[in-house]
Image: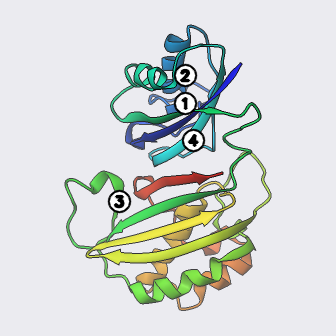
Amino acid sequence: MRNIKLTIEYDGTNYVGFQTQRTKDYKSPTIQETLEEALKKVCKRKTNLVASGRTDSGVHALAQVANFKTDSKMPLDKFRVAINANIPEDISVTKVEEADADFHSRYSAKSKIYRYLILNRPYRSVFEGKYCYLFTYKLDFDLMKREIRCLLGKHDFKAFQAADKKKKKSVRTIKNIKLSKKNDLIIFEIEADGFLFKMVRNIVGTLIEIGRGRFKKGSMKRILESKNRKLAGPTAPARGLCLLKVIY
C-alpha cells in the first residue's frame, strides 16, 4: 500500500473549511470532501484524506499538506494531473510525493506557519480584498510590533481560544512571530507547534484593538496571563488568514 503526500493550495472563500463536516446542514462544500470526490474517481474507490490540520471557513492555504493510502500504481506526476482535472479552479494540488509508510500529515508535523494580512487604508482593494482584512482606522504599527513579543515561547493561550466542542490543552509554543509592513499592508506571521481554534485570528483581533488605541500598552501580556477569552479582542475575519507552510 502506497502512502501519497499532497501539497495543496486553495482559496477558502467558497468553502466551510478544510475538514468534512459531520452534519449536512450547510450549503458550501469543504476542501476535504471536494478532494476526496476527485480521489474516488482517480483511484476508483473511496479514499480517506488526512490533512495536517483543519483550516476554518473562509481561510486560505498556500501549502496545506495531506496524505492518503492507495494501492494504485499510477505515477506521481499523473496523480497531480488527474486530481487537478477533477477539482474546481480554486483548489490546486501543487506537489505529489511518495511518503514513508508511517508518515501522517498531522502527527508528523513539527510546526505550522500562518500569515494574516491587514490592509490599513480608507479604501478597499479590488484584487486583494478576498485575501486581507480592510481596516480603515489608523493603527499604531510600532506599538503593535512591541506588543507581540510577549507571545514568543511556551504559554497557555486559553485567552485566545475560541469555544470548541473538542476540549484541548491550551498550552502551545510559538517559535517565531513577526509583524512587518509593505506600503498599506500590515503582514503578521506566526509559527507554532500547534494552534487552538481561531487562535491566530483572536490574536490579530486583539492586536488591532491595541493598534487603534482601544487597549492600552501592555494589554497583550495582561490578556495572555489572564487566560480569559472575554478580555481579548474580537475574532479577525477569516479572509485575511492563510496557511503558509507545514514543517516536518
Left or right of residue 53, residue 185 in this image: left
Bin the neighbour count of mark 2 within 10 Å (Cα to Cα): few under 14, some 14-19, many 20 and up.
Answer: many
* Vertical side of 224 occupied by 194: above or below: above
Where does the image place residue 66, in percent across and percent down from the top left? Answer: 59, 36
The residue where tag 4 is placed is 65
The circle on residue 36 is: 2
The residue where tag 1 is placed is 32
- How far apart are the two marked residues, 2 and 1, measured between alpha carbons? 6 Å
- How far apart are the two marked residues, 1 and 3, measured between alpha carbons? 23 Å
Q: Earlier in the sequence, mark 3 or mark 2?
A: 2
Q: Earlier in the sequence, mark 4 or mark 2?
A: 2
Q: Earlier in the sequence, mark 3 or mark 4?
A: 4
Q: Are marks 1 and 3 in contact (CB under 8 Å)?
A: no
Where does the image place residue 248, in percent across and percent down from the top left? Answer: 66, 51
Bin the neighbour count of mark 3 within 10 Å (Cα to Cα): few under 14, some 14-19, many 20 and up.
Answer: many
Q: Quadrant of the N terminus?
A: top right
Q: Secondary structure at mark 4?
A: strand
Left or right of residue 89, residue 74 in this image: right
Q: Nearer the viewer, residue 70 or 61?
A: 70
Q: Earlier in the sequence, mark 1 or mark 4?
A: 1
